Image (cartoon, grey):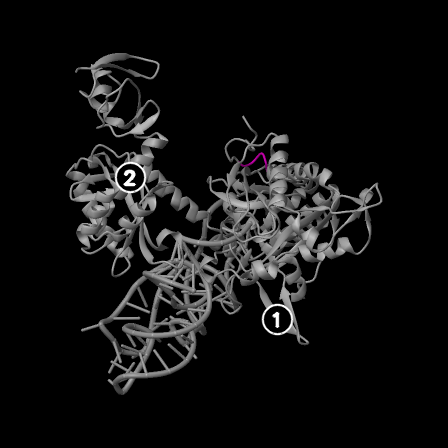
Amino acid sequence: MRKIISINLKGRDSCEIEAGSLSALDSLKKLKIKAIDRVLAVKINGKISDLSILLNDQAELVPVYFDSEEGLEILRHSTSHVMAMAVKELFPGVKVTIGPAIKDGFYYDFDYKRPFREDDLPKIEAKMKEIIDEDLPFFRKELPASEAIDFFKKEGEDYKVELIEDLNENKVSLYTQGSFTDLCLGPHIPSTRKIKAFHLTKVAGAYWRGDEKRTMLSRIYGVCFSDRKKLKEYLHNLEEAKRRDHVKLGPQIGLFNTYKEIGAGMIVWHPNGAMLRHIIEQFEVAEHIKRGYELVKGPEILKTELWEKSGHFDNYRENMYFTMIDKQSYGIKPMNCLAHMLIYRSKIRSYRDLPKRYFELGTVHRHERSGVLHGLFRVREFTQDDAHIICTPEQLNDEIKSVLDFVNDIMKIFNFDYDLEISTRPQKSIGTDEDWELATKALIKAMEDNDLKYDINEGDGAFYGPKIDVKLQDALGRKWQCATIQCDFTLPERFDLFYVDRDGQKHRPVMIHRVILGAIERFIGVLIEHYAGAFPLWLAPVQAIIMTVTDRNIIHGKKLLKNLTDAGIRIKGDFRNEKLGHKVREAQLQKIPYMLIIGDRECEKDGLTPRLRNGKNLHFMAVKEFIDLILAECKEFGNKSIETGGNNHSKKS
RNA sequence: GCCAGCGUAGCUCAGAUGGCAGAGCAACUGAUUUGUAAUCAGUAGGUCGGGGGUUCGAUUCCCUUCGCUGGCUCCA
């Protein structure tokens, strides 16, 4: 029996067709949508599908275009299938596993008798281009799981068999293009020629199903965009990121270095970097004192017994270093909380004393696995701007809220946008379910009270409590975890912390662990890349450099050097017998904000002419005028001179 | 820790199918006295990351170790 159905473009044209007579693509054509060749898939009543699907029921259609987020995901996923096909043709005996779309591209994991190498990529890429030129259509087929298992067994694709068995579905779908068939939910692009711009970028090892106890597979990464221009743009951004790379830039501008004779993951701060740290640390101390924190300082090593008591020994041992002193085992601290607990416990506390807010720029050591180390971002010794707030359960909400405000204030000063995530109870953890629930709710409530939007990160909390993680975004839009706020009911219990309440009875306080910048090392790494080494004046380790034109000007230059140093300006002098252009070039490469040119004119009129690092010259000015200029600029924290694109700090819309 | 790649002067890089190790910049010395991204000349600089092996001979081939890079796992 013929059935007539009505189809329409969401909120627009509609028409009637015979059920099962037209594919989604033909229907879209019939509805005369724009730029049909840029459509990759379709949403049918909200559900995303292949264009080849036949319409059997009344449908509201929304075309999915190439450059939409969903379109790109489909395109990238299909490209991964094309890559898998190319690899199978080039490397007989290879087994395929999974190959999803990811940010900017895709990957596919393979099991082959040898891992893939970078120099395999051009061959694979060439093969992929052949496949794309053949314009092979993607076919979808649904079949019972058992049949699919038989099919993949025959093909020798054991990983696919395992995947289907674990799916526990009666029916599965397969996609085929040319000689290649893959287990896949879809949807896919109509045919391979839709792929216009891709590039294979790197090879890497990856564990089967992310489990380090299972087979090491060989992963190939690629990027893929809707057109060549976007691909070029992406590659250009990579170059830009390389130009800002703190691992290279840091040593070049005299901030820090690493030394293999000292050891992996250990940072040595050179004068400019030590100055930068000092500026940031001083700033932080002042900000904390302003907000009612007290400075404290714990030792670097504490008895192992204490780490056993806190739960670190059971839950964090692999990351800790231990040493023996007089037959006593000690652990080098990986966190700062223990001493803070004992400081609290050193007196009987009344509810009137709470909250106690202990702040420490605490240097910790963690045994990070060698493969994860990277520049300042992952190190084995680092300093946290760490505080522990011990308060009554009633105060918890307000305290979390004020920490969130604190984070917001500081991020604004450094000109960072950020996102928030709540991480819940992990597998390996201590404490009761009730406490975890209570703590998690407290975090959520504080976020909602502050009208902040957040994501949930299941099972990603610390072993002693859930946390709010702050992911800041740098000038290139990359995200970094820095601040974290963690709620803890367990350590107060383990250390038997209490306060005496109005009722004269002992009660258990709650503890918040929190950092604002996180690890100073990582934060400085982010800053270097954010500013490309050209720090705003208040952070610049060297704010200005005096450069003389000839030796006649040295006396005046030295006088200025003293005046400006006395005024508290971080200044250097370049009195070498070099041409001015040479001195300018070097200062420029060092990204020093102000170059103060001193020639005969400046000597006669007793002043200086500043040149900015952007190449602009200011007018001649007296020393006093320059000092005022600098002090005023420092007060702005550089927020006017950098553009990071909008100042949205995660407020709910 | 695992997979892959890499390590030659302070930096950027050449080099040799195994036969005395090179350039530019930086450094140092001298000349030059200079006005906004590199003045000229000269000098010095290396157990080719370390250790072991194969070889008449290793920076080159093999093993091992240290370090770096990109991923995986982990994380501030």
Q: Chain of mark 2?
A: A
Q: Nearer the viewer, residue A628 or A583?
A: A628
Q: Chain of mark 1?
A: A
- 10 Å neighbourhood of mark 2: few (<14), some, or many (≥20)? few
Residue type at mark 2 is Asn
Q: Which residues are magenta?
A: A638-642
Question: From the viewer's perspective, is A320 left or right of A100?
Answer: right
Q: In this rendering, is residue B71 above or below A414? A: below
Q: Position of residue A340 (x, y in %)?
A: 71, 54
Q: Look at the image and tell me whether residue A203 can be seen.
A: yes
Q: In this rendering, is residue A514 above or below A314? A: above
- 10 Å neighbourhood of mark 1: few (<14), some, or many (≥20)? some
* Cα–Cα gap, marks 2 and 1: 57 Å
Residue carrying label 2: A170
Dominant secondary structure of the residues highlighted in magenta in the image: loop
Residue type at mark 1 is Thr
Helix, strand or loop at label 2? It is loop
Is A640 contained in the magenta span? Answer: yes
Is A636 contained in the magenta span? Answer: no
Q: Position of residue A175 (x, y in %)?
A: 23, 39
Q: Position of residue A541 (x, y in %)?
A: 61, 50
Q: Nearer the viewer, residue A509 or B54?
A: A509
Q: Specify the quadrant of the image occupied by residue A641.
A: top right
Number of numbered markers? 2
Q: Position of residue B61 (x, y in %)?
A: 27, 73
Residue carrying label 1: A323
Q: Look at the image and tell me whether residue A552 can be seen.
A: no
Helix, strand or loop at label 1? It is strand
Question: From the viewer's perspective, is A195 left or right of A313?
Answer: left
Q: Nearer the viewer, mark 2 or mark 1?
A: 2
Q: Could you confirm whether marks 2 and 1 are on the same chain?
A: yes
